[in-house]
């Protein structure tokens, strides 16, 4: 089974129409790490007591030898904002458990859905999606 | 099951706010495990108390598309584990690998290797961990 982490930042279905606010599905196999702090697409991590970043292999950059520039090392990031400071482990555990749940999982692991008002852990308050591009 | 290794190198809850604190890496990102102290460039120096878990970097993608002059693009991440007992690395690594491959029905996939705040440690002999990562990739 191919499992995907699902994120939707917007709170209105009418705004479900782009890469920042709309529906995004990231393959579980593309997770690089979950890390405390606020990570940019160039990997810089800024202190953030309520920020948990999930980093992914980038959707917008392939593995071929295009017009190389420093930005082509970039990653995709989903920043999870928590309403509890300094406590990412419960959210990490909830995500890992959901990834491994079965046998009735349909492969869609909803982490945050602003339209439906659902989230995988109560301490999640919002998300921000950041994407690498191959310019 | 897709397992993840968690480490928290911080020793106070207030310090759990940055890259010197809590990480959760997929086991599938492990490149190698071995005795000694490894740096982000892959060089291993001798240590009687440390073992390394070399990982695909969390903040550099896996393509080969980065600028040729950007040596950071070749770097890796490392969980550097310090043990109390000298030359006890093999026993500790074996225990970790057995946990990675355990298939007990009660497992949830979350391997809490070390947490400096809660005091949780999967291997009793661990005294500290350090996660070594690259700076920004560009």
Image (cartoon, coloured by chain):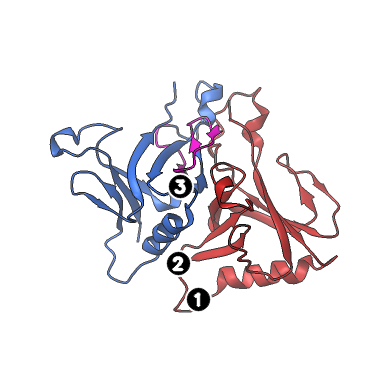
| Same chain shared by disc 2 and disc 1 | yes
Q: Quadrant of the N terminus of chain A?
A: bottom left
Position of A7 with respect to B42 (left or right) is: left
The shade of chain A is blue
Q: Chain of mark 2?
A: B
Position of A39 with respect to A59 (left or right) is: right
x, y percent for residue B22? 56, 50
| Depicted B85 relative to depicted A116: above or below | below
Identify the residue shown where x is 38% and y is 49%.
A27
Q: For marks 3 and 1, give the CA distance.
A: 34 Å
Identify the element where label 2 is drawn.
loop
Identify the residue shown where x is 58% and y is 25%.
B138
Select label 2 or label 3 by which is in front: 3
**Residue B103: numbered disc:** 1
- Residue on which the image places disc 3: A85
Q: Which residues are magenta?
A: A38-60
| Depicted A61 relative to depicted A99: above or below | above
Identify the element where label 3 is drawn.
loop
Residue extending farthest to the left is A14
The shade of chain B is red
Asked if the residues shown at circle 2 and circle 1 are in contact, with their CB atoms under 8 angstroms apart, the answer is: yes
**Residue B1: numbered disc:** 2
């Amino acid at each position: 089974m191919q499992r995907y982490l699902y994120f939707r930042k917007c709170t209105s279905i009418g705004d479900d129409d782009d890469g920042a606010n709309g529906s995004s599905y990231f393959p579980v196999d593309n997770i690089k790490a979950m890390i405390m702090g606020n990570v940019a697409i160039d990997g810089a991590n800024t202190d953030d007591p309520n920020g948990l970043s999930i980093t992914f292999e980038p959707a917008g950059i392939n593995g071929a030898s295009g017009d190389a520039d420093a930005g082509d090392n970039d990653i995709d990031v989903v920043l999870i904002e928590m309403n509890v400071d300094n406590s990412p482990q419960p959210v990490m555990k909830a995500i890992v458990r959901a990834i491994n749940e079965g046998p009735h999982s349909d492969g869609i692991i909803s982490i945050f859905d602003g339209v439906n008002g659902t989230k995988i852990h109560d301490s999640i308050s919002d998300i921000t999606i950041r994407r690498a591009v191959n310019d | 099951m897709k397992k993840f290794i968690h480490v928290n190198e911080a020793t106070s809850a207030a310090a759990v706010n940055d890259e010197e604190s809590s990480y959760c890496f997929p086991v599938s990102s492990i490149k190698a495990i071995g005795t000694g102290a490894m740096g982000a460039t892959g060089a291993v120096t001798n240590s009687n108390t440390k073992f390394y878990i070399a990982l695909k970097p969390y903040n550099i993608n896996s393509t080969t598309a980065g600028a040729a002059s950007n040596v950071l693009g070749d770097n890796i991440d490392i969980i550097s584990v310090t043990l109390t007992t000298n030359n006890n690395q093999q026993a500790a690594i074996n225990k970790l690998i057995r946990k990675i491959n355990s298939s007990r029905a009660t497992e949830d996939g979350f391997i809490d290797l070390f947490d400096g705040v809660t005091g949780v440690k999967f291997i009793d002999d661990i005294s500290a961990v350090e996660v070594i990562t690259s700076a920004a990739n560009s």
